[in-house]
Amino acid sequence: MVLSGSLLYALIFGPTLGSLFGKAGQQDAKASAALRELEEGDPTRLSNLTGAYARLLTLATRYALVTFLLTLGALFGAFTWYGASGNGMVFFSDSDPKYAIIAIKSRGNLAAEQINTLVLEVEREILSIPGIKAINTTTSVGGDTRRGMDRNGQIFLELHNENERSQSGVEILEAIRTNTAHLAGVTVEVRKMEQGPGTGKPIKLEFRSRNRALLEPAVTRVRDYLDANLAGLRDIEDTRSMPGIEWKLDVDRAQAALLGIDVAQVGMAVQLVTNGLKVAEYRPDNAREEVDIRVRYPASERGLGAFDDIRISTPQRLVPISSFVDRIASPRVDTIQRINGMPVEYIRADVAPGLLADTLVKQAQAWIDSQTWDPQLTIEFRGANEEQAESMAFVSVAFLLSLLLMFVLLVTQFNSLYQALLILFAVVMSTAGVLLGLIITGKPFSAILTGVGIVALAGIVVNNNIVLIDTYNHIRREHPELDYIALIVRTGAQRLRPVALTTITTIFGLLPMASNLSIDFINRNIIYGGQMSSFWVPLSQAIVSGLTFASLLTLVATPAMLALPHQLRHVIARLRRGTTPPDATPMQEPASA
């Protein structure tokens, strides 16, 4: 919408306002002479910046092949350097947090009062840290399968604005970890609230198999590796069942059938020891639902040893249940999670400040791939890693589609495949510039914001090439007598100012965001690394670095590549002349007497 409005202004309102308030024709003699030199003379004779650029362009155009090879070398070097020295990838942006979630975990069959006491103790330690604006504390009994069965409380934290506290958000969250580390019997996890799409903890491993017996051993094996070898991980949790024992009663059906007992009788006898056998229902006068009436043994006779004393009546005699039922101890199962009917388990982990989840994921993935696993077991990274891969796939498709649409439009307008490809070559230059900017600033590649910046650049950087090539075609039609070097030099000299101005104004417009500065004119505050500025830094820095690099190369490489076809035709023509046999010279007749 903004580009459409600017086009309308440039074509209609700008000329109208210029005719009303402009001062056409009022130029000094020096400016008029420079303009005539640009349009009709030799721009290399100018003594200003345009003349220096014209002389550089003459040299680059005369040796077009060398310029083209140097450009390819610069682009190849940029991509290679990033591949060797890149700072990894993040899903969205890594800005200073203003909100955080504190998870409080404790094991054991705790009463509500005990859980409340533990959570309040953590809360007091948090409130002793300056910079916290508000908190909201909740407790829970029984845990949550999605967050871990041992989670008993949660504190939602809001920090003061950046100009109202002396520490950054990351420093405050690290202080919370330090102040709560000494609390016995309590595990405190501190996680800043995500800025973009929510993915939970950045590292999430999913274990999937139809054979549930394979899941927990695999989770234990991977968890032990992560604890021992990846020091950058913290707050590691998994969805294995909490430690405990469940007793399984294994009925020997063949022996029970010989005694004339079925499994239903065994179940009724066991209920007398456990929850009781339902015999009827009763609804009190002040109740809306029925109440079960259950019969069971007295409390003194409901221990674990009672299973050995249970006897079941048969037509012949009372038979001890232990004669055909085995009591087997097995690990306790809290819940069974399934996705599309497939049992799953998870490992989730956070990353220490200064480290990238993408780097640690690659290390863990390399170890997992090197191990031998049961073919029925599938181990995959989910969470931020999965969202990151999907975002990159989407951005790649959008990028290729945008290039295709631009290519079709350019071919129809310029009627030249070479010139259309030459214009789109600026997209490769801008991408290399984005990667160079990430290396210089030491920032990671943001799958969403940097990716969107590259796609946006595809529509911006081609404008400079369009201006140059369109002017080149126009001058070639108007002045067919000029040789190709003079033609290209005049094109570059005439278009240097508009290309430079559009590039510089775009870069300067994005510099406040790209420099990570939050400027408050009303309160006269300038904050570096604020939450809002950090949110847009990857996008703005991608456009600034990509546009700068692409524009510098465009002003030299594009004119040189316009000269390549002329020089190649000359080379081919010279080769043809060199291989054509010379014409036979006719014999002279002898002179007459």
Image: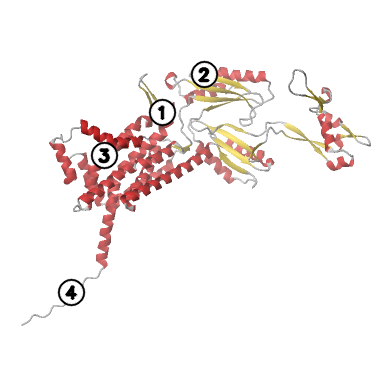
Q: Contact (CB < 8 A) between labels 4 and 1?
A: no
| Vertical position of residue 152 compared to residue 53: above or below | above
Q: Contact (CB < 8 A) between labels 2 and 1?
A: no
| Residue closer to the observer: 169 or 276 | 276
Residue 20, percent from left and from top: 21, 31
Q: Residues within 10 Å of mark 4 (few under 14, many from 20)?
A: few
Tell me the amino acid under the disc marked 3: Pro
Task: Tell which circle, 2 or 1, labels the residue nearer the N-terminal end.
Answer: 2
Residue 58, percent from left and from top: 22, 48
Task: Tell which circle, 4 or 1, labels the residue nearer the N-terminal end.
Answer: 1
Label 1 residue SS: helix
Between marks 4 and 1, how big is the CA–CA gap? 81 Å
Q: Quadrant of the N terminus?
A: top left
Q: Residues within 10 Å of mark 1 (few under 14, many from 20)?
A: many
Between marks 2 and 1, how big is the CA–CA gap? 23 Å
Name the outermost residue toward the right: 316
Q: Which residue is mark 4?
A: 585
Q: Which residue is mark 2?
A: 134
Asked if residue 364 lies left or right of residue 433, the reply is right
Task: Tell which circle, 1 or 3, labels the residue nearer the N-terminal end.
Answer: 3
Task: Tell which circle, 3 or 2, labels the residue nearer the N-terminal end.
Answer: 2
